[in-house]
C-alpha cells in the first residue's frame, strides 16, 4: 500500500516548502534507508556535508541527488534553500526484477534485483 505524500504539512505540523520523489532507483531499499536515516531532521547544508563523507556507494548518490533536486524546487519560493530542514524522508520498495542463475546439479536459483522509491520533503525551521 502506498503512502499519501500529497498533503501540505508534515506529521509535526510544519508546512512543506518543497519536495522531491525519485522512483525506481536501481538500489535496494534496505541500502537507501541506511543513508536516509543519516540525513533525517538535518538542514540541507548539514545533510550534504554528511553525505560527502559517507561511504555507501549504492545509496549516497541517490539521496544526494534527491536533496539537490528538492533544493532546486525550493529555490523559486525560498531565498536560501540550504537553511531548509529535511522534514520527511521515506524509502519504499519499488518493483522487483526477477532473473535466474544456474546452480550445481542442474538447478536454477532466483536473483531478485530490488528497486526503491525515495520521497524527500523540505520544511522550514
Image (spheres, rainbow, N blue to C red):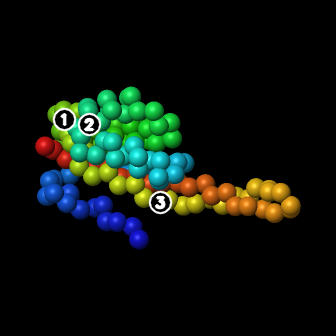
Q: Are marks 1 and 3 in contact (CB under 8 Å)?
A: no
The C terminus, quarter of image: top left
Say which residue label 2 marks. 44
Cα separation between marks 1 and 3: 30 Å
Near mark 3 (Cα within 10 A), the count class, few <14, some 14-19 or many ≥20, is some
Q: Nearer the viewer, mark 1 or mark 3?
A: 3
| Residue toward you, 117 or 52 | 52
Pointer 3 or 2: first along the chain: 2
Near mark 2 (Cα within 10 A), the count class, few <14, some 14-19 or many ≥20, is many
Say which residue label 3 marks. 93
Check disc 2 and report its element: helix, strand or loop: helix
Pointer 1 or 3: first along the chain: 1
- Residue drawn at the location 28% of the way across and 61% of the way down: 6
The N terminus, quarter of image: bottom left
Q: Do the residues labelled 3 and 2 touch (CB within 8 Å)?
A: no
Q: In the rendered image of this protein, does residue 118 appear above or below residue 81? A: below
Q: Do the residues labelled 1 and 2 touch (CB within 8 Å)?
A: yes
| Residue toward you, 125 or 5 | 125
Q: Which of the numbered marks, if any, corresponds to residue 41?
A: none
Say which residue label 1 marks. 83
Q: Is residue 47 among what the camera can see?
A: yes
Check disc 1 and report its element: helix, strand or loop: helix
Pointer 1 or 2: first along the chain: 2
Check disc 3 and report its element: helix, strand or loop: strand
Cα separation between marks 1 and 2: 6 Å
Q: Position of residue 92 (x, y in %)?
A: 42, 58
Amino acid at each position: 500500500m502506498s503512502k499519501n505524500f500529497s498533503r501540505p504539512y508534515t506529521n509535526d505540523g510544519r508546512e512543506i516548502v518543497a519536495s522531491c520523489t525519485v522512483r525506481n532507483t536501481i538500489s535496494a531499499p534496505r541500502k537507501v534507508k541506511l543513508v536516509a536515516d543519516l540525513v533525517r531532521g538535518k538542514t540541507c547544508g548539514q545533510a550534504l556535508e554528511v553525505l560527502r563523507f559517507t561511504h555507501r556507494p549504492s545509496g549516497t548518490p541517490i539521496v544526494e541527488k534527491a536533496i539537490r533536486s528538492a533544493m532546486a524546487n525550493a529555490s523559486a519560493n525560498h531565498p536560501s534553500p540550504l537553511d531548509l530542514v529535511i522534514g520527511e524522508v521515506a524509502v519504499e520498495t519499488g518493483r522487483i526484477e526477477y532473473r535466474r542463475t544456474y546452480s550445481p546439479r542442474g538447478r536454477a536459483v532466483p536473483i531478485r534485483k530490488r528497486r526503491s522509491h525515495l520521497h524527500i520533503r523540505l520544511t522550514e525551521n
